[in-house]
Image: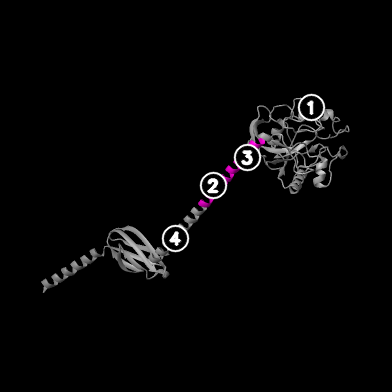
Amino acid sequence: MKLICCSVFLALMGSISMDVHAAGSVLKVKCEDKDVGAEITINGVFKGECPLTVQVEAGTVQLKLLKKIDASHEGVFEQTFRIGDGVIKNVEAVLSVRLNAEAQRHENERLATEAARREEEHMAVERAEAAKRAEAARREEERLDRVSEENKRAATRAGQIIKDCATCTDMVIIPSGEFKMGVKPGHSVQVNAFVLGKTEITQGQWRAVMGNNPSGFSSCGDDCPVELVSWNDAQAFIQKLNAKTGKQYRLPSEAEWEYACRAGGQHEYCGSDSIDTVAWYDDNSGKGWFSKGSTHPVSRKQPNAFGLYDMTGNVWEWVEDSYHDSYNGAPTDGSAWQGDGAKRVLRGGSWSFGPQFARAANRGGFEPAKRNYGIGFRVARMLP
C-alpha cells in the first residue's frame, strides 16, 4: 500500500514538473473595444481572438491581428519581438485600417490606370508643346527668310521713297546692316531693313491725321516739325495713322534711329562732322529759349547718306525704347529695348540746344507724358 502511494505521488510530481516546463512564456494580447474579436496569429498559426492569453515558446514572435471592417477594409496590427523563457509579455494592440486584399487589388488597378492616363496626358502635352515649338521654329524660319528677302530687296532699293497716302510723310527705305552703336568703340548691332520718315512729322501732317495742331510754333507753318507732343501723343498719332493707311507705323527703335542717323559712317553728327551743314541748333536758331528762337521748316539742311533730313537738330525725336542709363544688356538685333517705361529715349538734339547734345551718340530720357517746345518725332515701319 505504501509503495503504491509513493508511485502515485511521484507520478503526480512528474506531471506537475512537465506542466511547469511546458508553460514556457506567456503572451497577453489586449485590444480596444472596437477591435475585440480580431483574429490572432502567432508565427503564422491561428491562436484565437483578441483579447487572448496564450503560451508561447521563447524566441522570436511574429504577432498579427486581423479584423474585417466592411467589404473593402480591414483592421490590422503586426509586431515582431523576442521573448525570453518564463516571461509574461503584455501587448496593447491598436489596429490600423487598410484596404483588404481584393480592394487593394482594385485600387492598384485604378492607380495603374490613372498613372497610365496621366502619362498619356503628359505625353500628349509634350507632343503638343513639341508641335508648338516646331511650328514656332518654322514660322521664325519663314520670318527670317522673309526678312532676308526683304533685306536683299531693300539693298537694291535703298534710299527709295515710299508714300502711303497723299498727306503722309515720305518714307525712305533703310537697308539692313551692322554698325557700332554708342560712344567709341561702341557695341555691334545688326539692324534689319525698314523704312523711316524722310523728315520729322510736320505740323501739316499732324493736322491731317489728328485734326488739330498742338505746336507752340504754329506760325512757323505746315512744313515745320510738330512739337509740344509727348511720347504718348506720338503713339496716339501712330494709331490713327495706321487706321488711315492700313500700315503698321511705329516709332523707330533707338538702335534703328542711330543706325539711320549714321547712314554707314561715323560722323560726329547725323551725316557730317560740321553741325551747321546738317542741323538747326542754338547758334543758328535764336540762341535758346528766351531769345525768340524757334523751329525751322524741315529739309532745309543737308541730308545724310540715306537721304534723311534733320536727324540732327530742329526737334528732339522720340523713339520707342525705355530709357536705360547704359547699354549693358541692350538688344543687339536692332529691336526696341523695353523697361519700366518711366522715361522714354530722345535723340538728335534740338533748335534750342548746343552741339554737344546733337552728337550722333548722344541720348536723353524724358517722361512719356511730358511735352516740350523742342520735342517732336518721326515714324518708322517694317517692309514691305
Residue 74 position in % (x across, y down): 40, 67
Q: Do the residues labelled 4 and 2 touch (CB within 8 Å)?
A: no
Specify which label sits upstream in the sequence, 3 or 4.
4
Q: Pick whichever, 243 or 127, lies toward us.
A: 243
Q: Are marks 3 and 2 in contact (CB under 8 Å)?
A: no
Residue 204 position in % (x across, y down): 83, 42
Q: Mark 3 points at which residue?
A: 147
Amino acid at the residue labelled 2 = Ala
Q: Pick whichever, 94 or 248, lies toward us.
A: 248
Q: Tell how many labels.
A: 4
Residue 113: give its label: 4
Amino acid at the residue labelled 4 = Thr
Q: Which residue in the rendered view is the most extreme toward the top?
A: 274
User: Is residue 331 visible to the viewer in this orientation of the structure?
Assistant: no
Residue 277: give its label: 1
Q: What stretch is highlighted in magenta?
A: 126-154
Q: Is residue 312 magenta?
A: no
Residue 22: give its label: none
Image quadrant assignment for residue 91: bottom left
Residue at mark 1 to residue at mark 4: CA–CA distance: 80 Å
Specify which label sits upstream in the sequence, 2 or 1.
2
Specify which label sits upstream in the sequence, 1 or 3.
3
Q: Residues within 10 Å of mark 2 (few under 14, many from 20)?
A: few
Residue 134: give its label: 2
Note whether 248 is above or below 348 in the view shown.
Answer: below
Specify which label sits upstream in the sequence, 4 or 2.
4
Q: How is the image coloured?
A: one colour
